[in-house]
Amino acid sequence: MGLNRREFIQQISGLLAAFGMSETVLWQAGDRYYQALAQPTARKLALLVGINQYPGDISLSGAVTDVALQEELLKYRFGFQSSDILTLKNEQATRANIESAFMEHLINQASAADLVVFHFSGYGRCLKWESTEENPLSKNSLVPVDGGLSDASNASKLGVNDLLEETLWQLLAMLPTKRAIAVLDTSYTYPGSNFQGNLMIRSRPSPRTSQLTSEALAFQEKLKNQTSPTSNPQNIPALILSATSPNQVATEAKLQGFSAGLFTLALTQQLWLATPATSLQSSLQKVSCTVQELGGFLQQPQMVKPGVLLKSDSRILPITPGENNGLIPVLPSADGVIKSVEEGSKTAHLWLGGLPANILETYSANSIFSLVPPTNSPESSPTTLQIRVRDGLTAKAQLLDQSTTALEAGQLLQEAVRVLPRHLNLTVALDTELQRIERVDATSAFASMPNISTVLKGEQPADCLFGRVRQDALAQSALLSPGSASLILPQGSYGLFSVGQTLLVNTVGAGGEAVKLAAQRLTPYLEMLRAAKLIGLSANQGSSRLGVRVTLEKVTPEEKLLMQASTRRAPWPSPSEGSAVSGDSSILSLAVGSRIRYRIFNYSDRPIYSFLFGIHNSGSAIAFYPFPSQNQSAKSQPEIEQNLIQPGTTLTLPDDAVGSAWSINGTVGLAKTHLICSSSPFLQTFNALKPVMGSRGDGQGIITLQNPFKIAQAVLEDLHHASASNPPIGFSNWAGISDEFWALNVNHWATLSFIYRVI
């Protein structure tokens, strides 16, 4: 039995309210909104479980990081006390310890007004049961560190010591509070491999037959005796967010300096940035977009309806709320926090959990953060810190100015200047299913290409995967569009995949192709991926202070708002927003032939300039720079300021000169568009594009880029110059930044990104 719309909204509201967010927004002149205070007497309790070190050679890498991600978020963003957060990691996370901690730390301590959070990161599996009327054929379980072997013969002798999912529901039902949240970054379906592309799968094979240990059975019986016979498991007042659906996989990724579950990483990052009104709702949708963009469509985060797990009915809905609840977080949005301060209070150790993972990987020394001032403090120049060294999610920073402000642990941070390297490599993971000679040839071929490096699948971070195209890739393609299932792949062909094993469009070669020839053929595509990676590093919807709102609209058969994005930290009054279509999928789907347009509204106090860079669903890099109207003289030449947007006005892409909208064409696949805005003209970008502006190959004003990385470099160079001409207070000389880096000031640029799939 699935959740209906009303139930869904009520439970989403419960989740956000539980984190201290009110459903009431009091909008007044000057765009002042008021913080909704949590009940002062309410307590917030959390039990966080993460297991990397399982027995044998099946260890994970990111589950313990997940615990840290949640712990820092709960403490510094949502006001949990350290003493109220209990963590169980690795050898601590036995079944008995998890159950005991749940009983003693959560059930026995919580009261009706309290908030309870339970998080589990680790392996899951599906246990096959003998079918009886009381028991279904199989049961999902969380695998503790002492869960037992997955080998069928030994499991039948020793017993399985797992924590059944139904046991977790019983524990949740015993909580005295209605404000309960469970986050499960695990999965139960094992696809026969430990990896999906370059991502590690969080599920284990199931024994042929399963029998719980006597201790696990005894605990189950104890819970049954303590549970009221009149209690209805379907009325468990808990919201459960799952990394994936029952028949899909949850994955974790290796990143620069750390590993983490895709779901937990995306969820916590979005909650660091949670802002008022609709953007808080959309943060849940962005979690799914982030996970599916990296992990593919075989991992779709879901919201679970408790209780009905004991039945065979559907129990899943996507975590995409469909109504405006007007929710406000208790604390300001942040990109990080000061964890500790060295003697003298001038040097601090930072946690950067609010930065997106792709940006964090290249985040460089000399980047600047400003302290979030205390609520109701008098307006003054911000106190700024400059990063000296970064290691994964942590960094060491020093006070940049001569401020007398004393640094303290717990102070929130917001990004001020982003420093990025001008030299950017693309890393290709080689599929371990390639024969040794194939890997040798591929390594040699890619080594001859500038800015391309190779690693073995699963060993290090990567941007894409190179391997043989197998017929099972069609099953993934069919998830994008039923029509793609009719594609016949050449035998022995090579292609590129996303890190989550999704076949990239138009990268498949002819059958029998030599590895070196395949690598050479893919050179333009790799350059496009490098350009997309570079432009992606400019994404800053959460931190930008330039007042911009962008909407994506469908024009036919009727006008409809599809998606919208805005910069919530801009100091000017934010415009009211319409209601975007929620749909039943976390990533918007648009049919071939749909007609769309973008609208860019400037709500800042200065003129801004815009530029569109995208990856077409057919796999090519595209750009759009507004062109003089067709009713002007045929001799009209492109002008640098034809993309100018005055304060309080809107620019429509495309404008009436091109047509009422762009028609979506090409093959099925993902499309991603970046709308980049700056307080200064795009001089370098304009000069790079000017030679091809007069010939719009697709008839819609869209330019297919032959040199996408050069254009991407020009964009970053323009943003760098816009920032250098308007440095933040205390950073007037761009001190410490060499010519090998770009420095981007959040006051002077905004990159808002949109992703959809064409079907």
Image: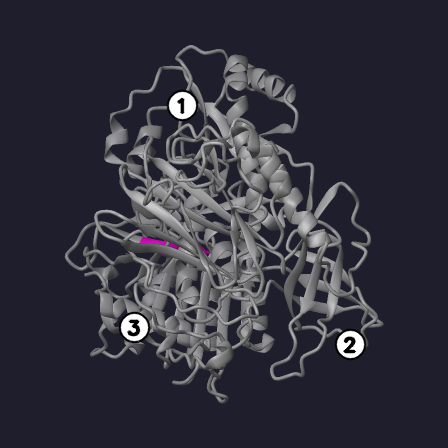
Q: In which quarter of the image is residue 749?
A: bottom right
x, y percent for residue 378: 67, 83
Q: In which quarter of the image is residue 69?
A: bottom right
- Provide the residue designation for mark 1: 469
Residue shown at 45%/82% (left/top)?
A: 28
Look at discs 1 and 2 and give the one toward the viewer: 2
x, y percent for residue 145: 49, 54
- Secondary element under disc 3, as helix, strand or loop, is helix
User: Does the magenta portion include 141?
Assistant: yes
- Part of the protein shown in magenta: 140-144
* Viewer-side residue, 131 vs 439: 439
Q: Residues within 10 Å of mark 3 (few under 14, many from 20)?
A: few
Seen in the picture, residue 91 relative to 383 is either above or below; the reply is above
Residue shown at 31%/61% (left/top)?
A: 304
Name which residue type carries label 3.
Gln
Q: Look at the image and name its color scheme.
A: one colour
Q: Can residue 218 be seen in this view?
A: no
Q: Which corner quadrant holds the C terminus?
A: top left
Residue shown at 26%/53% (left/top)?
A: 559
Name which residue type carries label 2.
Ala
Q: Going from the N terminus, do you reach mark 1 or mark 2 first?
A: 2
Q: How crowded is mark 1: few (under 14 residues within 10 Å), some or many (20 or more)?
A: many
Per the rendering, the mark at residue 10 is 3
Q: Are marks 3 and 2 in contact (CB under 8 Å)?
A: no
Name which residue type carries label 1.
Val
Per the rendering, the mark at residue 308 is none
- Secondary element under disc 1, as helix, strand or loop, is loop
Whole-angstrom CA distance, mark 3 to mark 2, is 43 Å
